[in-house]
Image (spheres, rainbow, N blue to C red):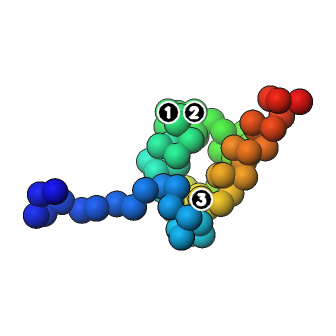
Amino acid sequence: MPQNAVRTPALDDADQEGDVISVADACRFLGVHRNTLYRLIHEESLPAFKMSRGGRWRFRRADLRGWLEDKQGARRS
């Protein structure tokens, strides 16, 4: 790894369950395009929040994992 490279932890690390993640990280975690993520937010389908008024969207990793499990369970039914 280059000396000036920044290591970012894997999104599925168990010890990082409570982490708050960004839009880019949420897109990678869910495997969706940014436009899809914003559509889900605006449809109020995806659990997201802003830290401050006018701030950027943030996500709790555990909430996204639960959302995915719910969606996968609904498909199997």
Q: Are marks 3 and 2 in contact (CB under 8 Å)?
A: no
Q: Tell me the amino acid under the disc marked 1.
A: His
What amino acid is at disc 2? Answer: Thr
Q: Nearer the viewer, residue 50 or 20?
A: 20
Q: Position of residue 34 (x, y in %)?
A: 49, 37
* Residue 32 visible in the current orientation: yes
Q: Quadrant of residue 17?
A: bottom right
Pick out the residue farthest to the left. 3
CA gap between label 1 and label 2 equals 5 Å
For mark 3, does the 10 Å Cα neighbourhood hold few (<14), some (14 to 19), or many (20 or more) residues? many
Residue 2 as seen in the image, left or right of residue 55? left
The residue type indicated by label 3 comes to Arg
Q: Please, what secondary structure does the residue beneath circle 3 have?
A: helix
Residue placed under numbered mark 3 in the picture: 61
Q: Comparing marks 1 and 3, which lies closer to the viewer?
A: 3
Give the CA distance from mark 3 to mark 2.
Answer: 18 Å
Cβ–Cβ under 8 Å for marks 1 and 2: yes
Front-most of 55 and 31? 31
Q: Is residue 54 visible?
A: no
Helix, strand or loop under label 2? helix
Residue at x 69% of width, y 43% of height: 68
Asked if residue 35 lies left or right of residue 62, the reply is left
Q: Position of residue 43 (x, y in %)?
A: 72, 39
Residue 10 in the image, given as x and y percentages of width and height: 43, 56
Q: Which mark is residue 33?
A: 1
Identify the residue under disc 2. 36
Q: In front: mark 3 or mark 2?
A: 3
What's the distance in space between the residues labelled 1 and 3, CA to CA? Answer: 17 Å
SS class, disc 1: loop
